[in-house]
Image (cartoon, grey):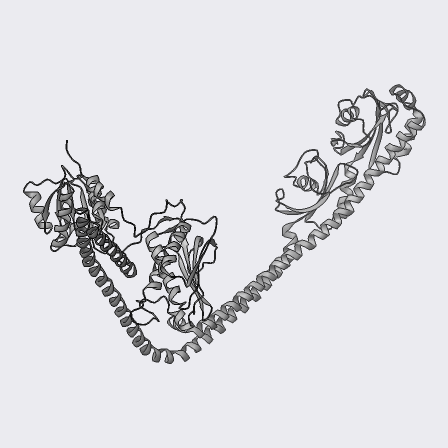
Amino acid sequence: MAHLRASRPLRILLLIGGLSVAVLLTATIHYIVSMHERELAGAERELTTLNLSLAEQTASATQSVDLVLTTIIDQMKADGIATPADYVRRMGGRDTYQMLRARISGLPQLDAVTMIAADGHLINFSRYYPIPPVNVSDRDYFAYLRDHDTDEPFISEPVRNRGNGSWTIYLARRISGPDGSFVGLVLGAIELSYFERIYKALQPDSDGSISLWRRDGILLARHPVLPDVGRAVGPRRFLQVLERARSGVYLSPGLDDGARLVATRALADYPLVVNVTRKLDAVLSEWRIQAWTIGAAGAAGIAALLLSLWALARQFSAYEAATWAMDAARRAVEGREQAEHALRQSQKMEAIGQLTGGVAHDFNNLLQAIGINLHVIDSRTEDERIAGPARLALQAVERGATLTQHLLAFSRRQQLRPVPVDVAALVERVSRLLARTLGQSVRIETELAPDLWPAMIDPTQLEMAVLNLALNARDAMPGGGTLWILAGNRSVGAGPVLGMAAGDYVVLRVRDTGTGMPAEVQARAFEPFFTTKEVGRGTGLGLSMVHGLATQSGGGVELDSRQGLGTTVTLYLPRARQEADAPSAGVAASPAPEAEKADAAGVGEGCAVLLVDDEELVRSATAGYLEQAGFAVREAADAAAALSLLDHGFRPDVIVTDHMMPGMTGLEMARTLRARHDATPILMVTGYAEDLTSTAAAQEVELTVLSKPIEPSRLVRSIRDMAVVEG
């Protein structure tokens, strides 16, 4: 098995051998099955031929009797017999008796002919004369033909002779007057033993049977004889077959002696059915012998093939053993080198992630301190010469926050927040921004499907991705050109595209008419930090962040670039199942200074806040802004100092804390408070890189998390909404 796992040629050899065994086994089984089908088909043909012959003989015998009856009726009509009285008066004599005796001579199947009056009593009878006083008005054939004006013959139920035990059926015909009135009947008695003798003479095998049935499923005659004449026997599946056609062949479960192959045929002019059967075991007896012989030969061939394969595999394994031993050391060395390389790569990426997270934390704290102080400056002056530069600096703070988000997204230390997004509105908003950014040399064209689906994506990251792609396109068109942004719908079927799961996607394409990429550059385009731009013009993070956004969101990215023909980057964004919210104003939008001042003024009156942050710049700036908003603020430089204030009786309405602090983190402090059954609302304002809202610990302690840098007005609103002010 070890050699099998290590040796591809050995696996191929065994695969070929396995396929050969499978082919031989399949061929053997197929041949046996084909023989089975041919045997059944041959038996069906034989039964069908015999059934047809017997049906013709049965029809001929019945037709001979029917011909006698119709001849008598035609003679009566020619003699002008048209009423019941004429019928009784003219056909009751000895001459009629002699005529009937003559009619039945030469027809062994015809036992007797009877003439019956309209009231049911016998008029004449071919067996003897004079006629006994017998009335048959209670018989099935009399009642049916009396009530139905028909030219069709009627086959009665079988009647048993009490003297000799033989069975008889009656073929009856109606005698009607010129006006269709009922005159009487003429009746022929058919001995069913006649058919049994015919069937016995024609039956080719002792394993079969031949039977005659009435169309309603009553058994009339059978060979071998059954004591069931006169009633329904067995499942009578032939009735279902005859509903669709006049004849057919089917497999019956049989009575008590096993399954039977049955050929059935209905007579054309009479309600009779002839069935011919053979036992299935007898039909397949020769096939079983042949199947066992062929199966044994096939099994012997397969065993020989397997033995040959086993011997060949042992030889092959012995041949490869030395090569495998020599390669083992080389593979071990290569494996160790690969493991070391993977470990170094993993350590490098982990270090980058940790470095990015730490830098983001410190950078966010600095942006928070700068932003709050700028808001304080803006809120304390009406001089536009001071407020204007402060607002410009706030925009720089917001751009710094966006840069931090990009770094965190690349290092995968910040979770995306996908929501249903109206891609058409986002594209139009970004297009207006690009029209002012890319310059007059680049023409922007958009093409959006009218029924565009919403996408489940982080809107901020998607907007930044489109901007990155547009800026790359601009750099690829130094002499100007056309930039297309196209969006449409696409359903991916069972064969996944780009490794994506089957489903519905919103397809967003950014296409340019630039210089394009050679194949070697296109192969590395999504690698982090890979760039072909000169120093200072690119970080190599743009396409890697686009790739990370699409794949982490459950979609994919496709790159198509040709030198001299431009580049197309296609984003597959998963479809959102609910409608998108109204589009926001964009990531760079900020509330108007006047609205912010009005929103923050005096909202904190009567609300006590415990502010915990180890960064003095951030803590002091935040405390100053909150006090200006009317809050009563107590400061603590770390979690231990905050817990000490609480232990000495300070009862704030809201605790505002940082997360990353020396000694005890903000999350650990929150868990400590909850363990003490302290239900004070906790607002965590952090520049930490990880998404704390998704951690189990944060869910346990029930806190609210905001990311730095945060607008002071939003911080004020959050504290106000969380505070529970008495009275």
Placement of 302 over or under 387, stated as above or below: below
Pick the residue in front: 532 or 652: 532
Q: Residue sitting at 69 percent across and 42 percent down?
A: 244
As drawn, 460 above or below 317: above
Identify the image quadrant of residue 465: bottom left
Task: Indicate the quadrant containing the N terminus: top left, top right, bottom left or bottom right.
Answer: bottom left
652 or 387, which lies in front?
Answer: 387
Along the viewing direction, whichever of 380 and 192 lies nearer the viewer:
380
Instruction: Give left or right: position of 321 versus 354.
Output: right
Vertical relation: 23 (above or below) 674: below
Residue lying farthest to the left in this orientation: 648
Q: Residue at x 44, y 78 (%)?
A: 315
Q: Position of residue 343 (x, y in %)?
A: 26, 69
Q: Residue 364, image x and y in percent?
A: 20, 56
Is residue 263 at least partly visible in the picture? no
Q: Quadrant of the C terminus?
A: top left
Residue 372's place in the image compared with 482, above or below, is: above
Quadrant assignment, res 69 = top right
Counting from the top left corner in percent of width and height, residue 431 is at: 40, 55
